[in-house]
Every structure is written in C-alpha cells, then in structure tokens.
Amino acid sequence: MTQSRLMGACLVLLTAWVPLALAVDGPDANAPVRPESTTVTIGQANDVPVPRVLPACAPRKCLFAGQKVTVIATKSAISVALLEVKPEFEAATGAQLDILRLPGVEHYPTIISDMTNHTGKYDASIAAAWWVGDMVAGGHLLSYEKFYDDPRFPKWDIDDVLPGPRNLLSYGGKKYMVAYDHDGQVLYYRRDLLNDPRHQAVFRQKYGYPLAVPQTWVQLRDEVEYFNGQDLNGDGTPDHGIVLALQPGSQGMFNYMTLSASFVIGPANARLYWFDPRTMEPLIKSPGHVRALELFVELVKFGPREMLTWNHGRGWDHFLAGRAAFALTWGDLGALAQQQGSKVRGKTGVAPAPGTHAYYDIARGKWTSTAGVNQVGNTSGASWAGVISKYSKVPEAAYFLLALLAAKEKSQVYAARGWDGVDPGRKSQMLPPEGTGSLAPYLRANWDPADVRDYLSAFERTFSNKQQIPYLRIPGTYSYWLALDLRLMQAAGGQLSAAAALEAAAVDFEEITIRLGRERQRESYRTSLGY
C-alpha cells in the first residue's frame, strides 16, 4: 500500500474518534457552543458550563497585546474547548486567537506540511499523541520546559496526570505535549445483568463458576457467549454479548492492543511488544500475540456481524440501546451512557481491561505463569494534547493558551460532561482516596453515582498500573497500525488464521521500516521507549 493511501486512511480515523461535531466555527466562535450532530444517535448532551479562571487584563498591561495566535485542530467535538476559551484568552492576554478547525482528513497533513516547510503559519495544534514521533524526529516541536514554571502563565500540574498518560506528554526526556485529553480503553458491562440472580444461577450451572465482573479474557469470553442471543433490553429482539467497533482503518487495532497487552507484557517484560529495539525486527507474530488474536476472533463471534463495518459511534449506539452486555472502548461511552435517552444509565459498570494467568516472555522465548491475574494498563487512542510549533513567532502566547486549557478547574468539567471528547486521566478528576477530585462535577453532568464511581476507579487503575503497553510514537506510526488493522480484520472475517494474519503483519512492518530507514526508525523507537 502506498504511503499516500496509508496516510489517507490514517486521517479518516481522526474523524471517527470523537462523538460530536459542532455547530460553531469561524466568525461565530463566540456564540453558545452546542452539539450539532453525531454518529451516536442515542442520547442528548448535557449543558454544563466551564468556569473562567482568569480575569481580563488591565489596559496597557496585557501580556501579549497585539499578538495573534493561530491554532489548528480537528473540526469535531475535541476542539469545542478552544471555541469556549477564546473570549477568556483574548480578554486575559490582549492577544487575538484564530482557530482553524479542519476535517480530520486535512488536519495532520496541513500542520505537518506547515512544519516541514518551516512556514510557521500555525503556532499550535491539538495533536494526537502518535504524531509526536514524526514531529520530534523532524525537529518541528518546541519544548515548553522553560515556560512551565514561569508565573506569567496559567498553572497546571503535569504530576496531576496519572502515570500512563503522563508518559505521553514527554519525548526523549523533554516536555512537548500540554495535557488535555487522556485516552485509554476499559471494559464496560451491564451491572444489572451480572447482578441478576437468574443469570447468576444459569451461568454457574453452565460454566461451573460464578458470574462476576471478568478478571481474565477467558472469563470474558464465557460471559459474552452466555449473554449473546438473549434479549437484554426487553424489546423481544435477541441481543449480543459484546460490541466492538471494527471498521477497517478505524480502531480495531486499538481493541487488539488493549486485549493483547497481558498476553505479551508481564513482570519480566515491560517493553518488548512492537519491535526488538536493537534490530527493529517486528515482534507482532510472537506466540503471545497469536493467542491474543485467536481470543479476539472468538469474541467477535459473539457480537453483531455488522460490527465488522461499524465505527465507534455505531458501536456505542448498540450499547446505549441496551443491546450488548459488554463493550471495550474509551471514556466517551461512560459519559454518553448518562445522557437523556440512554437505556443504560445507572446500569453501566466499568472495570479495567481483563488479564491473563500467563504471558509469552519474548526475551526468554517461553510462556510464563503469574501468581495472580496479569493485567496491563493502556493508553490506547489519540490522547489529544497541545503542541507548539518550533516555527511559531509567538510561542509564549501559544503556550499560555494551551496551559489555560489544561487548568484543573476546566479539565474537571471537560471530563465530567464527556460529549466534548475529553476523557479523564488526572488525580484531580478521580475520587478519594486515590484521587483529589469530587463527585460534584459529575453529578452536575447528570451522572449516576454508582456509574461514575465504577468509571473513575477503572480509569485510575488503568492509568496507574505499573505495567503499561508501550505506546508507539515513531515516524510512520499509523502506517504500522493500519497494516496491523487490515490483517486483524482478515482474521476476524475468517480470511486468514490468527498466525497467518500476524505473520503477514510482520512482513508489512518490515517493509515499512525498510522504506523509512531502519537506523532512523531504531533511533526514534529507542528514544520513545526511554533507552
């Protein structure tokens, strides 16, 4: 597949990642922000105001008077906060803020072209974490190290971000990304179904152990098989055990990454997942990966066949309508489940991704049993965050904007309302004793108390887990990911066995590495892993 086709598919993904498009843009950016449309059709977004944290500057004392900051972002819900913060930023600094919101297929090529040509038209971007490998390798990003502790700028605390997503904010020991959205995948389940005495009795009789929140992937496989084909929402129609959004070129590889992590990563192997850092040999065909894909294919059998073509919104709709017992996805779904029209508000339990009792230790070449369940945290997803172009003529004003977006008081509301695509990942968004936040922002956003406690606990444990699947941040990341995704879909669709699909993916990976330059890729990969 050509690089242009791979990039095109990469950028199609961006438009599929956030649940809501916005009606407000350009000259109307000061108008009230409201959701316009969404691939999710069930639910009505809650209107939760975001607090202002800065006063207007005094005349002739505005820090950036006469300057103009131009920021580029994807035209979707993930950029709603930029529209909201524009009046506050301009009043507090005296600067002008121009916001260019482009369709996902145009955002990345526009900003990377501007950087590659050293134009400096765009001062900042709300960027996906996987872009950083390309941007840093090209020397295109400005580290904000010297701004971070400067009292002139809004204060935000990088140590407030939980360890998993915090690792994505730096690269090669330097801070490049200003915290905003924190992506990771968790397991959603119907609490009412798992607590139903009738289901508990029948499940135990059939499988020989209690029905409970799945701790292992094998247990999840049994439970999705059990619920598949039953009427789960009382409408007389058979429903499904699980829903996964598997549209090719969309996000199937993220589901697979989350699932496969505990088959490969373990106490004696923290980093060997994608490549051998000495040689860049692909590791994706290891026995651990193969077994994980075999289970992945099993799970697909217990969901709607149509989900092989579904994007995330269509899959979320299925769960929100009460038509699936489980879903493996991002934080957005938990917030969407609280909206008016959801059939599962007050019934949506959330847990970290299940694990295994053994993983394949790639370095030792053998399966290794663990004393307890081997669970691995993940930051699967985009984790949108602010970056500053090295070619910006107003880098300080650009950082001021990004730091304002990162303010604790704002981030707590972003995470609670959910429809803006911003997911939680900070201590100040979590509940005590693990976090320093409170229920108040979530209750204002109409969360069911039991749902939100499960939700935040699951993310806190996911992001604080000492074991994390390595996030790929090297040039051509999405070329590798798309190649993997297409092979996964061949396995899920029955065209290839799990072993054959991953063997083919390894060949694809090697071809991409050769094309981009093995030594360049090796250096970037080692830097991204902290070698």
Image (cartoon, grey):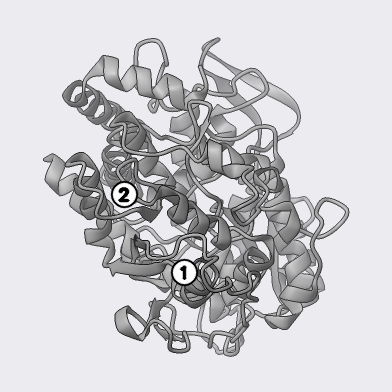
376 or 235: nearer the viewer: 376
224 or 55: nearer the viewer: 55
At x 19% / y 53%, what residue is drawn?
8
Contact (CB < 8 A) between labels 1 and 2?
no
Q: Is residue 120 visible?
A: yes
Q: Is residue 217 left or right of residue 64?
A: right
Determine crowd level at label 2: few under 14, some 14-19, many 20+ residues with C-alpha closer than 10 A: many
Which residue is label 1 attached to?
94
94 or 499: nearer the viewer: 94
Q: Outermost residue, right direction?
A: 433
Above or below residue 64? Residue 113 is above
Above or below residue 397? Residue 58 is below
At x 62% / y 83%, what residue is drawn?
48
Which residue is label 2 attached to?
489
Residue 333 horizontal/vertical position (percent): 56, 69
Above or below residue 151? Residue 511 is above
Q: Is residue 378 visible?
A: no
Label 2: which secondary element: helix
Write down the quadrant of residue 17 in the picture.
bottom left
At x 53% / y 23%, what residue is drawn?
271
374 or 157: nearer the viewer: 157
- What type is the residue that disc 2 sits on? Met
- What type is the residue that disc 1 sits on? Gly
Q: CA distance from mark 1 to mark 2?
A: 51 Å
Residue 120 horizontal/vertical position (percent): 25, 49
